[in-house]
Every structure is written in C-alpha cells, then in structure tokens.
C-alpha cells in the first residue's frame, strides 16, 4: 500500500460530515456566503408553505354559516401570491448562489489538486499509477460537480423546507406534529444503516474507477509495444477485468441505494395515515378544525417530500463523499521536498556542488520490512565549472545522486550544498533558474518545437530562440526541418527521432542558461549524425558550467574532466578517464567491456 493509499484510508475513517467540513476548508469558496444563502432558502420555503396555510384559512374563515366570504378569500389569495412570488425569487437567488459557489469552489479544488500532484515526491509518482492520479483530478472532481448541481442544492432547499414546515406544524397542533415526527423517526435509523453500507460500496466504486482508468491509460499509452508483441488481447483482458470489477461494485452500490426510495414512500404513507386518523379521532374537542386538519395533512406531505427526496439524494451524496475522500487523500499527502521556510540566495557566479556524508533510502515496498539504503555516507565535492561523469552498474546510485543534486528528493541523512548553501535553504525558483536537468527521455508537448522551447522560458523571443540554436551550432538541423522551429512534434514528440527530441531538450536547457547542468545520458539511442550534433551541442552547453553526466555510454565519461565510479552507493574510483584507464581497475574493466560490445 502506498503512502497516498495509507492517507486515503485514514481519510475514509472520518465521518461524512468531517469529510465535507475538511473539503470546505480546502475549497473556502464552497462555504462563502452559505449562511445568507440558507436564509434565502428559508424565505423560499415560506413561499411553499403558503398554500396549505391558505387552504386552512379559506376553509375555516372563508366559509362561515354556509356563506362564502369572497372578498376575504380574494385578499388571502393575493397575499399568498405575493408571498409565493417572493419565495420563488428568494429560492432562485439561493440556487444561483449555490451554483456560483460550487463552481468557484470546485474550480479552486481542481487547480489545487493538480498543483499538489505535481508537487508530490517522485517516490509517490513512481508507486502511484498515473491513471489513478488523473482519475482524482477528473472523475472524482466531476462527481462533486454532479453532486452540487443537484444533490447539494437539494440538501439546502429541502432542509430549509423541513425546518419551516416543522415550525408551522408545531404552531398548528404540537400533538399531531410530535406524532408525525415519531412515526417518521425510524426512517432516520434505516437511512443511517443503509448510509454506512453505501459509504463502503461507493468507496469501492471510486477505487474501481481509478483502477479502470489506470488500465485504460496504460493500454492506450503502450499501444505500440502491445501491437509489436501481439499482446493486445492480454492487455484488453486486464482492462475488461478492471472494468468488470468496477461494474460489479457499481451494481452492488445501486442495489443498496435502490432500497432507499421505497422505504421513504412506505414511511410517508404510514405518517399521513397516522396523522389523519389521530386528527379525526381527536376532532374539534382538541380545537382542531376541519381546515386545520386539511392544512396539517398538506403540511405533512410538505414535510415528507424532502425526506422522500433524501432517499435519492443520499445515494448521490455518498458517491460525492467517496470522491471527496479520494481527493483529500491526495491533498493530505505531504508534497515532495518541502519548500525553504527562510530561503538563502545563491551566490552570484559559477556554483560548485557537494554531498556531505549523504545517506538515502527509498520507502520500503509492501514485501519489505525496512528501507534499503541506496547511498551510504557518501561525500563528493564537485568544484565550480568541472564536468563530472557518474558511471556504474544499474542500481549503483547514479540517478539518485542526480536527483538529490536537483532536489527532486532530500537525503535521508547528511546534506547537499550548491554554492556552499544547503539545498534545503534554497528557494525552488532560485534553484530552477540556476540548475537544469536534461533527462534521458525528454518530455515534449504535442505542439511545435518553439512552444516546447518556450516551455522553459515563456517570454523568450524568436531572436533568443535563434540565438540558442546558433550557440549550440544546430543551424543545419533546424534548416532541415519542414517548418523550422515551427515544426509540430506530435504526441509526446513522436514525430521526432530520439536524437532530435534530445536536441530539443538541450536547446531548452540552453535557454535557461544554468550554472549547473545535469545530463542523464543525453546521447543514448541516437543515430550517428544526430550523435555528432549532440556531442557538439553538449560541449557548447557544458562549457564553463558545473556539469554532472549520468554516463551509460562510456564515450560520455571519456570526454568528462573527472569520472566517479559507483558501486552499491559508494565511490570506488575517482579520477580522470586517462588516470582510471592507467590504473587498470573497475573503470578499465567496464570501459573495455563497453568498447568490445560497441565494436561487435
């Protein structure tokens, strides 16, 4: 179970009211002006109560001694019409206010959730399926949107109506009012019992929905690999299994929810029959007139209308609460490396990088009892302007060191400094302006090359883009493109070759003009012509900058000023390429093996 799952499970243990309260705290716009909106809803409810009162007054005072008091009834009707119109205007205003508050609140919640997901640590992103995260931003928030469009509105209007009707019923005849309340009270117990089961049922529905979206997302993203291995059918089987699981959960929740509506109808009939029977039995001896009994009967129907609707609304409410819990599970998850509370400015000029007795361990997997150290008491000093290559077998700690220097993660123990300043004390925007990472598989948006370059520097002019191209001596490459820098790259850059995508990444880094450059083997999987361009561009880009290269191809290490050979999170050799080759140790063995493999 991931950290996000653990936190979501903790949120799930809270009651629905606590969950909603926390949701409003996360999206304050949802609760803005709620009290005044409720007052408007109460005024609207008064308008709906007017008709039963009008009927009672008309029967008791409009028909006296066989005479119809037409003038009285007309005046009463005109007064009631005014109250109804006022109530309708108030109710419409309440509906409008709820709608505006809901949209504003959910907009803020969606944006905040999206921002929070991107601030989670890479460890959280690595263990949480991407489709599940997308599902929380899309379907879970959409569930809340649907709820506020009807369910939240119904709660507001129906509660205000019940409040007003209950007050009028007590004013008419408190005995009959208490009888009505007592007869309908067991329905509350029934609703509570069913609601608990609905909570669990809709939690499973939302979890199933996240798994389904993850399976679909993975299958669509990996369609090329699936077709290449003729593995479409097994992938579709996984999607079918996840979809079927989600469907069964939804059916179970629907069956439980279907029990609510008839239960409300049954209790409604019992309540009306009981009220009418006791009212007739008590008769005028209790001061209950014919008009009062008729008016009270209609008031009882008015009181039961919201309860009957609640049996439908509560179903949607549980869906929304389940979705909200999943959203809060993300928002309650601590973000990646926390921002510096009292940031220290990085010094001007070139920056050196150092690791001081750094230990790092990833969180243990489910089958592991304790975390395993990736780095152990590692100390490295990289002077400003030096190009250092990190080499070693897979799992030796190369990528982890790069992530710690880029502060994509914090060490478990020890400290990392840049320009002699602890990274934990550097503001993120300051660090990103001075340090850039070029990943092994650069991500490109489905737009033009120019757009993907400006992603790093939105205000960059055409002249600045052209200067970056000239600076890295890539004019010939741009000239060979169909539309120059306005060439579309396709979905995830698939219209470009692997080498061309890496060229775009280097140009993007050049625009930032960083003092520290981290390269994750930016010359892997490229054709010979583009490798020449890349090597030339890399030399230009790295010149005068502190550069850390994760070298899988040892030709990269041979061009570096210094090579660090890693094994199990420790530096086992440190020196220039020539010195390490002459030493004849681990690096010489790795280089000879690589050279033999490339010449085969």
Image: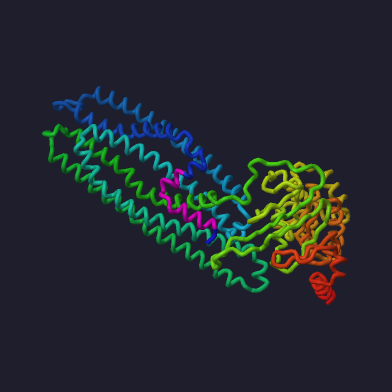
Total numbered labels: 0
Q: Check residue 16 for magenta coloring.
A: yes
Instruction: Give coordinates of residue 490: x percent, y percent.
Output: 72, 57
Q: Check residue 5 for magenta coloring.
A: yes
In terms of depth relative to the viewer, which is nearer, 193 or 599? 599
Determine whether, in the image, residue 141 is placed left or right of residue 417. Answer: left
Residue 284, placed above or below residue 439:
above
Q: Residue at x 67, y 62 (%)?
A: 376
- Residue 446 visible: no
Q: Which residues are magenta?
A: 3-21
- Residue 116 visible: yes
In terms of depth relative to the viewer, which is nearer, 423 or 502? 423
Question: Which residue ends up furthest to the left in the rendered image?
Answer: 285
Which quadrant of the structure image shows residue 286? Answer: top left
Which quadrant of the structure image shows residue 82? Answer: top left
Residue 199, placed above or below residue 339:
below
Instruction: Give coordinates of residue 83: x percent, y percent.
Output: 35, 28
Instruction: Give coordinates of residue 163: x percent, y percent.
Output: 32, 36
Q: Which coloring applies here?
A: rainbow
Instruction: Give coordinates of residue 464: x percent, y percent.
Output: 83, 44
Q: Quadrant of the C terminus?
A: bottom right
Q: Main secondary structure of the magenta part?
A: helix
In terms of depth relative to the viewer, which is nearer, 575 or 317? 575
In terms of depth relative to the viewer, which is nearer, 274 or 328? 328
Q: Residue at x 20, y 33 (%)?
A: 291
């Amino acid at each position: 179970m991931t950290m996000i799952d653990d936190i979501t499970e903790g949120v799930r243990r809270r009651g629905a009211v606590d969950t909603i309260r926390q949701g409003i705290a996360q999206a304050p716009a949802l609760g803005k002006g709620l009290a005044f909106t409720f007052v408007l809803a109460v005024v609207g409810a008064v308008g709906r109560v007017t008709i039963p009162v009008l009927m009672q007054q008309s029967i008791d005072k409009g028909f006296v001694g066989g005479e119809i008091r037409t003038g009285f009834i007309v005046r009463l009707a005109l007064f009631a019409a005014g109250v109804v119109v006022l109530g309708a205007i108030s109710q419409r205003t309440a509906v409008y206010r709820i709608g505006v508050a809901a949209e504003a609140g959910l907009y803020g919640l969606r944006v905040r959730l999206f921002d929070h997901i991107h601030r989670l640590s890479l460890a959280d992103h690595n263990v949480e399926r991407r489709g599940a995260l997308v599902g929380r931003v899309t379907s879970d928030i959409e569930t809340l949107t649907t709820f506020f469009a009807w369910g939240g509105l119904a709660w507001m209007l129906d509660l205000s109506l019940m409040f007003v009707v209950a007050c009028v019923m007590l004013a008419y005849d408190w005995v009959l009012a208490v009888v009505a309340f007592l007869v309908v009270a067991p329905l509350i117990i029934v609703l509570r019992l069913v609601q608990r089961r609905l909570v669990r049922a809709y939690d499973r529905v939302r979890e199933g929905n996240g798994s389904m979206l993850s399976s679909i997302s993975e299958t669509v993203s990996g369609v090329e690999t699936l077709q290449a291995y003729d593995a479409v059918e097994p992938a579709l089987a996984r999607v079918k299994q996840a979809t079927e699981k989600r469907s069964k959960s939804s059916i179970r929740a629907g069956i439980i929810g279907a029990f609510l509506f008839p239960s409300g109808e049954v209790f409604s009939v019992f309540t009306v029959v009981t009220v009418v029977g006791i009212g007739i039995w008590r008769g005028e001896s209790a001061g209950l007139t014919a008009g009062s009994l008729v008016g009270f009967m209609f008031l009882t129907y008015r009181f039961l209308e919201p309860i009957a609707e609640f049996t439908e609304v509560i179903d949607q409410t549980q869906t929304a609460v389940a979705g909200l819990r999943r959203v809060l599970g993300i928002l309650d998850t601590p973000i990646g490396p926390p921002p510096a509370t009292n940031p220290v400015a990085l010094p001007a000029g070139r920056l050196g990088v150092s690791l001081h007795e750094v230990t790092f361990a990833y969180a243990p997997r489910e089958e592991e009892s304790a975390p395993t150290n990736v780095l152990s008491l590692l100390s490295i000093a990289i002077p400003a302007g030096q190009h250092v290559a990190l080499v070693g077998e897979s799992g030796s700690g190369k990528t982890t060191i790069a992530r710690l220097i880029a502060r994509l993660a914090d060490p478990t123990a020890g400290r990392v400094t840049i320009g002699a300043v602890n990274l934990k004390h550097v503001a993120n925007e300051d660090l990103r302006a001075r340090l850039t990472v070029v990943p092994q598989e650069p991500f490109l948006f489905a737009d033009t090359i120019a757009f993907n370059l400006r992603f790093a520097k939105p205000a960059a002019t055409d002249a600045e883009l052209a200067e970056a191209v000239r600076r890295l001596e890539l004019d010939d490459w741009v000239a060979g493109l169909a539309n120059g820098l306005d060439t579309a790259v396709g979905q995830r850059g698939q219209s470009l070759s692997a080498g061309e995508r890496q060229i775009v990444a280097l140009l993007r880094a050049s625009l930032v003009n960083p003092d520290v450059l981290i390269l994750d083997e930016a010359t892997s999987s490229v054709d010979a012509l583009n490798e020449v361009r890349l090597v030339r561009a890399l030399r230009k880009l790295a010149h005068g900058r502190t550069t850390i290269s994760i070298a899988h191809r040892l030709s990269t290490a041979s061009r570096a000023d210094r090579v660090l050979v890693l094994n199990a999170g420790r530096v086992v050799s440190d020196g220039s390429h020539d010195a390490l080759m002459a030493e004849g140790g681990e690096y010489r063995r790795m280089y000879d093996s690589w050279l033999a493999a490339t010449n085969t």
